[in-house]
Amino acid sequence: MDDRSTWDVIIVDDEQDNAGVLKLVFEFHGARVRVAGSGQECLKLLEQGIPSVLLLDVQMPVMSGFELLERIRQRPEWRNLPVVAITAHVRQEDQEQIMAAGFDGYIGKPVNVVTVIDEIERVMQTKGRQT
């Protein structure tokens, strides 16, 4: 089993319950978890340190996940950060839009707590990050 205690995860979701479930799952596996309730909070957390992976709700008020991703990809130091969309929109056309926007993967809501770690691990490996 890979050492997930080395993971630093940022979860961005304006719904505290959604973020809380993901936080518990990652902490159970030993990961360090930081939570942001908005795009602005996320940018501040990124300034404090680049995580192993960023989980990003695509539908948030003020700054959507798509807008936040665009801002992240503009910064050279964040450009290669694995960013995974967390969304309730899981139709094929939604998935295509998410991937076309530059996300590295997506996870549907409600999140499957049994498989989410493996799904994130696959994205990180594809992106060339150590897991």
Image (cartoon, helix red, strand yellow):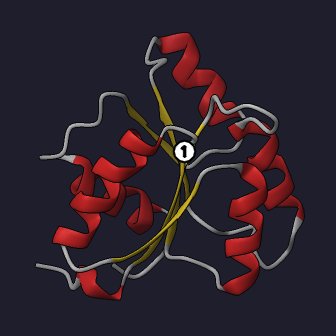
Residue 19 at x, y percent in the picture:
42, 49
In front: 109, or 24?
24
User: Most extreme residue toward the front, as rendered?
Assistant: 16
Q: Residue drawn 49% across and 75% down?
A: 52
- How many numbered badges does the structure rendering display? 1
Q: Residue drawn 45% across and 11% down?
A: 91
Question: How many other residues sit within 10 Å of disc 1, few (<14), some (14-19) or many (≥20)?
Answer: many
**In the image, is residue 33 above or below residue 14?**
below
In front: 2, or 35?
35
**In the image, is residue 29 above or below residue 91?**
below
Residue 30 at x, y percent in the picture:
22, 80
Judged left or right of residue 25, residue 93 is right
Judged left or right of residue 14, residue 42 is right
Residue type (three-letter) at the residue carrying disc 1: Asp
Q: Residue drawn 16% across and 69% down?
A: 28
Residue 107 at x, y percent in the picture:
39, 37
Residue at image mark 1: 13
Q: Quadrant of residue 32?
A: bottom left
Residue 77 at x, y percent in the picture:
79, 79
Judged left or right of residue 100, residue 94 is left
Q: Secondary structure at mark 1?
A: loop
Q: Quadrant of residue 110?
A: top left
Q: State the quadrant of the C terminus.
A: bottom left
Q: State the quadrant of the N terminus.
A: bottom left
Q: Residue drawn 79% across and 60% down?
A: 72
Judged left or right of residue 110, residue 62 is right
**In the image, is residue 75 above or below residue 5?**
above
